[in-house]
Amino acid sequence: MVLNESLDKKIIPIAGGKGGVGKSVLSVNIALSLAVSDKKTIIIDLDLGGANLHTVLGMKNTNPGIASYLQDKNRSFKSLILDTPFKNLQFIPGDTLSYGMADITDKQKKEILFEIQDLDADYVIIDLGAGTSFNTIDFFLISNSGLIVTTPQAGAVMNAYTFLKNLTIRFLQKAFASNKKMEAYLKKNIKRMLPGTNLTLAHLLHEIGQEEPETMEKALTYLEVLQPKVILNMMEEKEDFQMAANLAGLVKKDLLVDMECLGAILFDRNIDDSLHNRHPFILEFQETLTAQQIFRIGQKIAQSRNFPELPLDYSEYRDSFELSQIETDNDFELYEQIKAAESQPDNGGYDVDQLLEVIEIQQKKIQELQQTVRMMGLGDKAGPGGLFNF
Ligand SMILES: Nc1ncnc2c1ncn2[C@@H]1O[C@H](COP(=O)(O)OP(=O)(O)OP(=O)(O)O)[C@@H](O)[C@H]1O
Ligand SMILES: [Mg+2]
C-alpha cells in the first residue's frame, strides 16, 4: 500500500460499493476538471469486470487495455496510455473484450499497482467497479484518499458503508501483517462483524484495548491514515444531503475513520444525454449548475496544496460537511429559481423579465461561489468561464 501523501503525484481511486451510482461519469468529469486546470491527468479504467470509461470519454474501444497487458508479457504498461481529444488528459483503457478479468492474481495486482505508481502525471484518477471484492479494495488502498460515491438512496448508502467497513478491516489486516498475534485476532473476530451482528470495529478495538492498550493505540494511529472523501451524487432535494452526513457519522462511530465531504451533485438528465452523445458532460453542458458542482469538486482537489488535506477556511464553517451544506443550499435555491422560470406558461415556458432575473441571481451566486473559493485560498478559478476552452 502506498500513501498518497508521500508522492508528488496524487492517485485518486473512485469507488462506492453500489453499481450505477455515477462512479464512471464522475471519474471522467472530475479528471476533466483537473485537466482544464492545467493539471496533467491520467484516467484509468480499472473496472475490470465491466470496463466502459471509453464510452464516457466518447472514445472508441479499439486499443489494448489492462487485460491485454496482463495477457501479453511483451507489452509494457506505459504502451497502454492513450491521448484523449482533451488537453492534459490521457487514458488507460480496461479492455472489455476479455472474459474473467474481474479475477486477477495477487501478483498481477501488485504489478498493476507498481506501474500506476510509476506513471508520470499530476493526478491519476482510477475508476473502480461496484462491489467490495478484494481487488477493488486493494486498488482503492493504493492511496489513503480515494473518493466514495453514493446516491441518497438507503441501499447505496449502506453499500458505501459496507465498502468502507471491508476496506478498514483489510487495511488493518495489512498494517498488522507482521504481527502474528494481532493478525490471528483480527481474522478470528472479523467473522463476528458480519452483517446482522452489532459488533463494530470500534467495539473490537475497545476489546483489544482492554488486554493490549498499545496494540489498540497503534491501530488507532493506522486508522488516522485513511482519509476517504464522500461525494453525494443524484440529489433530488435539499434534505438528501443529510444522507452523506449520516454516512460519515456512522463511519466515524463504528469504523473510527474520518471521512470528509467533497460536495454534492444534482440529479440531472443531461448526464444521460451526454453519455448518449458520447461527449463528456462538463464540456457539453458546461453552463449548467450540475457541471459547476462537478467543477467545484475538481477545484477543491486541484487547489489543495497537499491533497487529501482540503483547503478549508475554518473561520467560515465548521468542516467540509458544513461547507458542502452551504454550497448545496445555495445550489438548490438557484435550481428552484431556474425551474420556476422554465415552468412559466408564456413564451414557450420563458418570461423574458423573469429569465433575466434568474440570470442575474445566477451571476450573483457564481460571484458568491468565487468569493468562497477565494476565501479557501483557491485563486480565481471558481467559475467555468474560459476554463473549458481546449
Ligand atoms: N447526477 C446524475 N444525474 C442523473 N443521472 C446520472 C447522474 N450521475 C450518473 N448518472 C447516470 O447513472 C448511470 C450510471 O452512471 P455510471 O456508469 O457512471 O455509474 P457507475 O457507478 O460507474 O456504474 P457501474 O457500477 O455499473 O460501473 C448513467 O446512465 C449516468 O448517466
Ligand atoms: Mg462504472
Image (cartoon, rainbow, N blue to C red):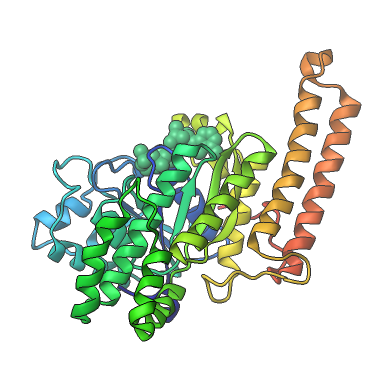
Query: Compared to 49, does 69 lie above or below?
Result: below
Q: Residue at x 43, y 80 (%)?
A: 221
Left or right position of 323 against 132:
right
Q: Relative to 319, is 132 on the left or the right?
A: left
Q: Residue 224 location in percent, x, y?
A: 46, 75
**Does residue 278 show up?**
no
Query: Up-down: is 168 above or below 21?
Result: below
Using the rendered image of the protein, determine whether residue 64 is visible from the camera's viewpoint.
yes
For the image, the number of numbered tags is 0
Q: Nearer the viewer, residue 148 or 116?
A: 148
Residue at left offset 54%, top offset 40%: 152
Q: 122 and 113: which one is in front?
A: 113
On the rendered structure, is 125 left or right of 173? Answer: right
Counting from the top left corner in percent of width and height, residue 204 is at 36, 67
Outermost residue toward the front in this view:
210
Position of the N terminus by quadrant: bottom left
Look at the picture and state if 170 lies above or below 103.
Answer: below
Residue 66 sits in which quadrant? bottom left
Where's ligand 1: which quadrant? top left
Q: Residue at x 15, y 63 (%)?
A: 106
* Image position, residue 25 (x, y; %): 46, 43
Which quarter of the figure has residue 351? top right
Residue with the most extreme right position = 353
Residue 283: name its quadrant. top right
